[in-house]
Amino acid sequence: MSSIAVRNIARPDPAVVDALARFGVATLHEALGRTGLMDTAIRPIYSGAALCGPALTVLTHPGDNWMLHVAAELLRPGDVLVIACSAPNGDGMFGELLATSYKARGAKGLVSDTGVRDVKAISALGFPVFARHISAKGTVKATPGSVNVPVVCAGMLVNPGDVVAADDDGVVVIPRDRAAELAKAAQAREDKEAATRQRLAAGELGLDLYGMREALAKAGLRYID
Amino acid sequence: MSSIAVRNIARPDPAVVDALARFGVATLHEALGRTGLMDTAIRPIYSGAALCGPALTVLTHPGDNWMLHVAAELLRPGDVLVIACSAPNGDGMFGELLATSYKARGAKGLVSDTGVRDVKAISALGFPVFARHISAKGTVKATPGSVNVPVVCAGMLVNPGDVVAADDDGVVVIPRDRAAELAKAAQAREDKEAATRQRLAAGELGLDLYGMREALAKAGLRYID
Amino acid sequence: MSSIAVRNIARPDPAVVDALARFGVATLHEALGRTGLMDTAIRPIYSGAALCGPALTVLTHPGDNWMLHVAAELLRPGDVLVIACSAPNGDGMFGELLATSYKARGAKGLVSDTGVRDVKAISALGFPVFARHISAKGTVKATPGSVNVPVVCAGMLVNPGDVVAADDDGVVVIPRDRAAELAKAAQAREDKEAATRQRLAAGELGLDLYGMREALAKAGLRYID
Amino acid sequence: MSSIAVRNIARPDPAVVDALARFGVATLHEALGRTGLMDTAIRPIYSGAALCGPALTVLTHPGDNWMLHVAAELLRPGDVLVIACSAPNGDGMFGELLATSYKARGAKGLVSDTGVRDVKAISALGFPVFARHISAKGTVKATPGSVNVPVVCAGMLVNPGDVVAADDDGVVVIPRDRAAELAKAAQAREDKEAATRQRLAAGELGLDLYGMREALAKAGLRYID
Amino acid sequence: MSSIAVRNIARPDPAVVDALARFGVATLHEALGRTGLMDTAIRPIYSGAALCGPALTVLTHPGDNWMLHVAAELLRPGDVLVIACSAPNGDGMFGELLATSYKARGAKGLVSDTGVRDVKAISALGFPVFARHISAKGTVKATPGSVNVPVVCAGMLVNPGDVVAADDDGVVVIPRDRAAELAKAAQAREDKEAATRQRLAAGELGLDLYGMREALAKAGLRYID
Amino acid sequence: MSSIAVRNIARPDPAVVDALARFGVATLHEALGRTGLMDTAIRPIYSGAALCGPALTVLTHPGDNWMLHVAAELLRPGDVLVIACSAPNGDGMFGELLATSYKARGAKGLVSDTGVRDVKAISALGFPVFARHISAKGTVKATPGSVNVPVVCAGMLVNPGDVVAADDDGVVVIPRDRAAELAKAAQAREDKEAATRQRLAAGELGLDLYGMREALAKAGLRYID
């Protein structure tokens, strides 16, 4: 199995990433036509963690975190590390030392289909991490994988430079060439929701606000007293 | 499949609900003879969430939250929404906008056998939610289900107007016609526990306090030095 | 099935336990040659819970917590209760009253392969608990098990007097006769990591710090621009 | 918790049960408007097992199969035993001896939300069993439950006398008062499918047979060469 | 979300597919450098099922099998249907009628990340099916997805025309442009294994046959009597 | 982590093993006082597989099957290989070639807490295998583990030379020094069951045969007509 590390990847316009970072994952996922959501088993390791940035992808092998060191050199400030693995594995591949290194070099956070450890120290650093597993078990450095190749992480294809956004609701992958369009769609959705929220907070019903009564009757709903 | 929405349901005496709300789920479950506990996979979306109130039941179909809007109109202040689904589904059927609407209309919280989203916003609202899944994935409004019919939620039968109580220990369902009797049984249990707690805190042993030594010896326990 | 309770067990030197308590589980697990980690399904019931102490082991039967009362008498200040079960079971065997009793008698915390309840009250007590399940369901007192026999808890063999340490990263079991040696190995590891952490925080790369570049090239890694 | 055993329950017309027994579970589930399907974790213990008959319901407690002996006396030839439990439990509550007894008294099979054992012997008897768990672990006879009360089994409400049908596709519950109507609906569905099957086997396309092309175009499907 | 159906895709040379079909999945996975294996939760619905052919990919939405009818027209004899879904879903999207249609049009089998039903009838047809779920629950035809776009199925990226092979050991995806090279590598591996198998069957030890003794000693293995 | 292979272990009397082999796992587990049952997630890879013999234990590391070759030399005819792993792992560590080697050297079968592959070929060989996972993924030979040390397999402690028995109902571990006594207890149980089976097959009720009616009444069971 060949092992490569791609130094230069195309990243989206930083202004677009900043625009996307203002929205929650649920809004971005809606704006994407409900595509791009990773497996919901990926959860934040501390409540309130959130991130948004271009993906620097890492393909590892089970029980081996060697490529996470290769990634440290290739990451650019603002990047989000996306860790995939060639087979299901829950080992604690990522911990306090790598978090310290990644943070020092400007990374925005990490999303991993495998395991992490040093939860307390990483939470104290305020480095946002989303992972499938938490495990104290460490890893070896014996089999090289790849950096910045397309990977499948938590059931989603991630290309290097795609935008990855994560919060308490999950993780969404936004194809790089749709990032700009998405930021606009998300804003439009949010604008619309702001008005709706106010009316609902005042006690108005969604049935009226969205005009659902006729459609429900046509679909067969009967009210009974 | 017929789709109905029942407008008026029998609810328990509000004073009884208030009495029940003072107890934890573990106490209520004991007082119920250890019945009525939902599947333990239903968890609070924020630590410390708790609710108690008559159930307004909603039967949905996978990936479709249309009936949650119908429910908004039928709920009465103090109600707890109980969301069941005709097949296993983890989509984020309930989010910030519906939470805003339900809170505005006086609901006490929501228990869902499916998924929810907008965790951060709902937590900020202080609207207690217990769910099987968290997912950013939204839903359509295409197939009507029913409101205020008996449903099975997380393995438990819930009739409209049954009292549902939930906290960090889980979710329990109290049949409406047993609610008043339960409040008394729970109080009796709590009174007894208060005295026990004080004696245990002072270092007394349960073995002596509960008089277990003889029964243990009879059951075959041998001490070895 | 015979039921015994062993009154006196060999415990490690308290100074050694104090020394071990200063390290995180990930560090201890590394120092142990990556052995001794319990199944990662055992999680703290509140964020930040941590414990370290000699194991007082309890073998229970499903749905029966009788032996937890026997254990209360046999525990010594500083002990960690380790609860195993003769078959998989998620009932809430341990709750506020037992926590009050154990705390009053000096226990450092509890690790359970079954379930616990009264999460809110136990968290308020500040009594560290790690468990596989949370369930409001109580238990009977009908079948005696054993105290201070070797048990398998979450896939790991625990002998009475072994040191058990737990934090947000998981639970590790340290054989009693290796405890002293472990404390030294963990300290050596931590000393080394402190220096590494500082260099990584300053932006230095692990690739250089650990001298990995040549090994990676030999293993076949190719860089592409 | 009260313990009752109801001797006489209303059962559906045997001719209706015979009519329902000719259909597969998928067909019955469709005819029911896609309701009534138990959790898909309930699987046959041998390939090809199938059953159909009125439910004789048994509510047990974890690790206790006492009520299965009470049920043996109350069952009528043609009945299907439906085993529920007051809390999740995987013990082998049902084995060769009970299967021998039930078969001798005319039962058609068993559906259990808990565990079974003696898989080889039961398969040799040809007694159809569907269960959530397989476990060699036996049970005690200490706490009485109930027979012929409404139970929740694998997420579905089952009333005594409801028809339960099971095959390799799962288990479906048919309310007793809808059984006759269901048999007709299932037959109509099957008649229609027979013709469709023949045309599809001849290579005709569902797109044409069901007239889907226009609806797909309207829904936005574009063909690309 | 756009919905497209691609009519023409590049397929590998049929002679290469025939060559690959002679090998088991474990051999192909080894020859691929241990990449391409789908999540092991995908299992055959009957023992001994096996398939090999170019992937015709179908992207569905939860609870909706409309695109499986579109796929029936676009498949070519020898194709393997690969069903992905935009969110986790276990409904029985594929059953006897579609199996009849697909078989009539020459498909070699189906791999699904969702659910299937009519297990008995499909097994009788001898149409190989591998799926994550078995469920009697049917689906609607309301939301169009896509055919012959890249999909992620069971954690693996599948491009239309990639070769998919499956047997009792699992499912492997072979990129189309590596298919010819793979057939050769697999044959070389199988030739080598045939000789090894004969020597092991005669009682020779792998330790000697593979010359492992020195390496084991160097790695620290000590023998004890 | 030290790596050792123990050449000589104490095994039980072969006549005792033969005696135990005549009983099913459920009977042995009962005779053992309901202890010794492995996690029920360990299942036979083909229906009807069964084994009984002294354990030759192997401790592996995730993704590494090197020690399985060391074990091949140390096994004696009649042994059962018991594979444990230092961390959860589902890789296919054991396949056709090792099965060929083990069978040639007289092993009775294998029980693994990790994964196996080549299901079809091993089934054809008639070599009984029980495993937690099935996966086509192969393993490396890089890190030595140990042979014939005490291991925890599927939650149970197994000492080398303990008797391991497995069939469709699960896997049970019998301590070597209790093997002879167990064979007698199992025979006594079976003798008793034979008479019971005959009476139940003739339609007699367990209620009468076991004399349960009085105890049930005392426990509170009420019959209702």
Image (cartoon, coloured by chain):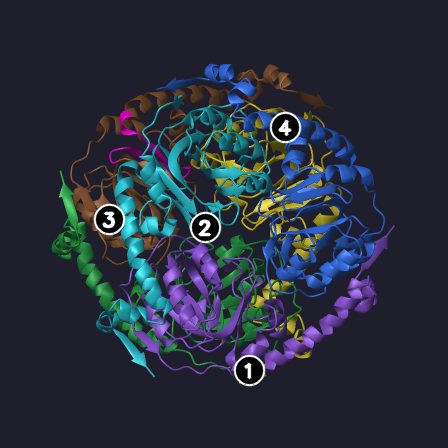
Chain colours: A purple, B blue, C cyan, D yellow, E green, F brown
Residue at x 53% of width, y 19% of height: B208
Same chain for labels 4 and 3? Say yes or no: no
Q: Looking at the picture, how far across and down is residue C145, in whole percent?
A: 44, 26
Q: In the image, which is nearer the foreground, mark 3 or mark 2? A: 2
Q: Are marks 1 and 2 in contact (CB under 8 Å)?
A: no
Same chain for labels 3 and 2? Say yes or no: no
Question: Which segment is the magenta one?
Answer: F160-177
Would you call the spot at circle 2 few (<14 residues within 10 Å), some (14-19), or many (20 or more)? many
Type of residue at label 2?
Asp
What is the distance, in whole Å, between disc 4 and disc 1 at their CAs? 60 Å
Type of residue at label 4?
Glu
Q: Looking at the picture, how far across and down is residue D41, in whole percent?
A: 54, 47
Q: Was residue B144 drawn as part of the magenta stretch in this picture?
A: no
Give the numbered dot on residue A15: 1
Q: In the image, which is nearer the foreground, mark 4 or mark 3? A: 4
Disc 4 is placed on an element classified as helix
Same chain for labels 4 and 1? Say yes or no: no
Q: Looking at the picture, how far across and down is residue E155, in whole percent?
A: 45, 64
Q: Chain of mark 4?
A: B
Q: Chain of mark 3?
A: F
What is the distance, in whole Å, between disc 3 and disc 2 at their CAs? 25 Å
Give the numbered dot on residue C168: 2
Type of residue at label 3?
Met
